[in-house]
Image (cartoon, rainbow, N blue to C red):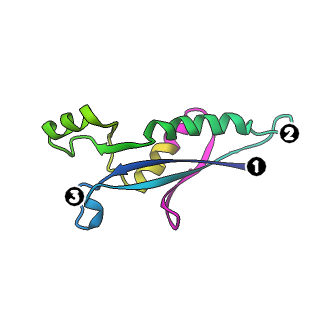
């Protein structure tokens, strides 16, 4: 079995709900997403890297330069006001690196045999979601 890895990134802001620390405030990251897919080659290739890169980039571009908000974590009035001025991406999960690694794993698994996804929120801190 072979593992192919590809990466992409996006810049986005978020905050952590129900958290007592600096990350309860709005802050940003350069989120780095490293995807590994597994498989055996057909005609010498598991999957064309161009396809993997394109699909991962599309997912990352969706979040790029946005404010990522966990659903129902802001008062409706504030959320509506922010939406008028800024690109808001609302998600159904707490916006942690752990949850993002599973999100990207699940989305990319719709097309590929994903082995793992690592999401870095800083150059030295990452969360990894691995195929069981």
Frontmost of labels 2 and 3 is 3
Tag 1's secondary structure?
loop
In the visual, does 44 lie left or right of 67? right
Q: Residue furthest right?
A: 43
Q: Position of residue 76 (x, y in %)?
A: 15, 37
| Cα distance between the residues tagged 1 and 3 | 42 Å
Answer above or below: position of 33 versus 106: below
Give the mark nearer the N terminus: 1 vs 3.
1
Q: Are marks 1 and 3 in contact (CB under 8 Å)?
A: no
Residue 118: say if magenta.
yes
Q: What residue is at 71 percent from the left and 50 percent from the top?
A: 3
Q: What residue is at 65 percent from the left and 38 percent from the top?
A: 52
Frontmost of labels 1 and 3 is 3
| Cα distance between the residues tagged 2 and 3 | 49 Å
Q: Position of residue 19 (x, y in %)?
A: 24, 62
The residue labelled by disc 2 is 44
In this view, the residue in front, 91 or 9, is: 9
Residue 8: say if magenta.
no
Q: Position of residue 99 (x, y in %)?
A: 41, 51
Tag 2's secondary structure?
loop
In this view, the residue in front, 55 or 22, is: 22
Magenta span of residues: 105-132
* Camera sees residue 132: no
Q: What residue is at 29 percent from the left and 44 percent from the top?
A: 70
The dot on residue 18 is 3
Quarter of image, res 72? top left
In this view, the residue in front, 5 or 26, is: 26
Give the mark nearer the N terminus: 2 vs 3.
3
| Cα distance between the residues tagged 1 and 2 | 12 Å
Q: Position of residue 57 (x, y in %)?
A: 57, 39
Quarter of image, res 65? top left
The residue labelled by disc 1 is 1
């Amino acid at each position: 079995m072979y593992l192919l890895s590809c990466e992409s990134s996006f810049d986005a802001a978020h905050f952590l709900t129900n958290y007592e620390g600096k990350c309860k405030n709005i802050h940003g990251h350069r989120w780095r997403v490293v995807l590994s897919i597994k498989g055996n080659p057909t005609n010498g290739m598991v999957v064309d890297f161009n396809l993997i890169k394109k699909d991962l980039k599309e997912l990352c571009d969706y979040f790029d330069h946005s404010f990522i908000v966990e659903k129902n974590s802001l008062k409706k009035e504030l959320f509506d006001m922010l939406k008028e001025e800024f690109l808001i991406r609302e998600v159904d999960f707490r916006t942690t690196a752990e949850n993002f690694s599973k999100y990207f794993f699940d989305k990319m698994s719709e097309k590929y045999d994903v082995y793992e996804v690592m999401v870095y929120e800083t150059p030295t801190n990452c969360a990894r979601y691995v195929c069981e």
